[in-house]
């Protein structure tokens, strides 16, 4: 009897014994390969049974920057999966996304409009359809800043220099606006709508001319643009009643015009009037002419919008009033 025909101690022949031994060894090795430890996305270890190992790799994503209120360019992560059967199918998820940004579970596309500034550590995770599934991930920082305000419209665009008119400023990124200036002068009573697109303010007094409005908010200060301009109109004198008066003064003169509100002085030939009042929302000034020599002088009114003077027929003429004539009785 040959060695190959020898029986094993349990009574089988030699060939069957060798095959049996090889089968036990293969089963033991398979058991070692199938039972393994996997690290999941949370960093915890878990025991699992693997039928195969197919690396799933998510490509690195560079740190991103964006601004609140501005849609981000679509960002699509990519992954490489060595799985061949079944055909790989990847599902995506994300943690730590900035508010306003979402991820498509099926495509991984990141899109949206950030709503809150800050630094956001983001982790993108891919999971395939293996049994059990394989995971891959990558992390990056997403920096969200606030855009500076932008002014697109000012209504009204002009008014008299005494200020006080309500002005509506339209634009974007006005959230938490802390200051509005007309030129270099602060406006009062700032009211911002919830969307951060409109501001209501009262124009401060200003000299005649055109100024740029600026809005300062959490994103900075708006840059000057043609759409943010406001024009202060100069004061105007239209008519002068009683353009002739006595050199001894005391003539009450009514001066009509526009932009005369807030007048701080009225002069006749450089001599201040001792008494004047402004009426009818800045369309009428009544002044008492001071004493002067006989001559024709300019009336000047100084207002927040500037100084306006009469000319021509509107100038004031001082005359010597002749004494009353005596009557003769025969």
Image (cartoon, grey):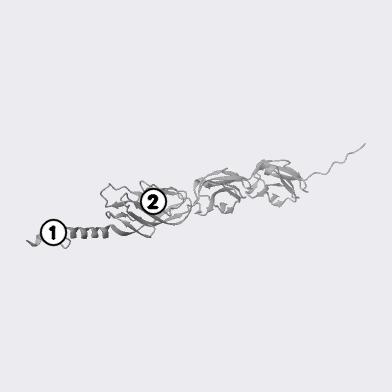
Please identify the residue farthest to the front as the structure is shown. Answer: 11
Helix, strand or loop status at disc 1: loop
Give the residue at mark 1: 13
Q: Residues within 10 Å of mark 2 (few under 14, many from 20)?
A: some
Front residue of 324/261: it is: 261
Please identify the residue farthest to the top as the structure is shown. Answer: 330
Front residue of 174/51: it is: 51
In this rendering, would 40 be left or right of 32?
A: right
Residue 220 vs 281, above or below: the answer is below
Please identify the residue farthest to the left as the structure is shown. Answer: 1
Task: Check the picture and name the quadrant holding the N terminus.
Answer: bottom left
Helix, strand or loop status at disc 2: strand
Residue 58: image quadrant is bottom left
Position in image of residue 72 (x %, y %): 41, 49
Q: How many numbered circles does the render carry? A: 2
Cα–Cα gap, marks 2 and 1: 59 Å
Res 174 label: none
In this rendering, would 11 be left or right of 136?
A: left
Give the residue at mark 2: 93
Whether tag 2 and tag 1 are in contact, CB under 8 A, the answer is no
Task: Check the picture and name the quadrant holding the C terminus.
Answer: top right
Q: Does residue 252 appear in this view?
A: yes
Position in image of residue 226 (x %, y %): 50, 46
Residue 140: image quadrant is bottom left
Front residue of 243/161: it is: 161
In this rendering, would 7 be left or right of 187?
A: left
Which callout, 2 or 1, points to the residue nearer the camera? Answer: 1
In this rendering, would 121 be left or right of 84?
A: right
Position in image of residue 19 (x %, y %): 16, 58
Identify which residue is drawn at 76% across, 44% down: 252
Position in image of residue 312 (x %, y %): 66, 42
**Precedes in sequence: disc 2 or disc 1:** 1
């Amino acid at each position: 009897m040959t060695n190959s025909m020898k029986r094993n101690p349990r009574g089988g022949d030699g060939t069957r014994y060798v095959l049996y031994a090889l089968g036990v060894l293969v089963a033991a090795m398979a058991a070692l390969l199938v039972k393994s430890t996997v690290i999941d996305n949370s960093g915890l270890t878990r025991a699992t049974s693997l039928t195969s190992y197919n690396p799933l790799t998510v490509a690195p994503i560079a740190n991103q920057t964006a601004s609140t209120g501005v849609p981000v360019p679509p960002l699509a992560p990519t992954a490489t999966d060595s799985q061949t059967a079944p055909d790989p199918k990847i599902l995506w998820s994300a943690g730590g996304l900035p508010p306003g940004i979402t991820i498509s579970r099926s495509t991984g596309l990141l899109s949206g409009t950030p709503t809150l500034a800050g630094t956001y550590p983001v982790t993108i995770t891919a999971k395939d359809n293996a049994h059990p599934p394989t995971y891959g991930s990558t992390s990056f920082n997403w920096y969200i800043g606030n855009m500076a305000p932008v002014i697109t419209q000012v209504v009204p665009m002009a008014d008299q220099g005494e200020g006080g008119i309500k002005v509506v400023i339209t634009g974007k990124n006005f959230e938490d606006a802390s200051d509005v200036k007309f030129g270099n002068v602060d406006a009062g009573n700032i009211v911002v709508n919830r969307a951060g697109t409109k501001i209501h303010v009262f124009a401060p007094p200003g000299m005649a001319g055109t100024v740029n409005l600026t809005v300062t908010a959490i994103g900075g200060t708006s840059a000057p643009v043609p759409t943010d301009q406001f024009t202060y109109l100069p004061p105007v004198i239209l008519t002068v009643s009683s353009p002739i008066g006595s050199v001894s003064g005391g003539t009450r003169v009514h001066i009509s015009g526009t932009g005369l509100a807030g007048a701080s002085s009225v002069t006749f030939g450089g001599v201040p009037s001792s008494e004047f009042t402004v009426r009818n929302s800045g369309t009428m000034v009544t002044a008492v002419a001071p004493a002067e020599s006989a001559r024709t002088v300019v009336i000047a009114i100084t207002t927040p919008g500037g100084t306006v003077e009469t000319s021509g027929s509107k100038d004031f003429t001082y005359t010597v009033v002749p004494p009353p004539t005596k009557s003769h009785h025969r």
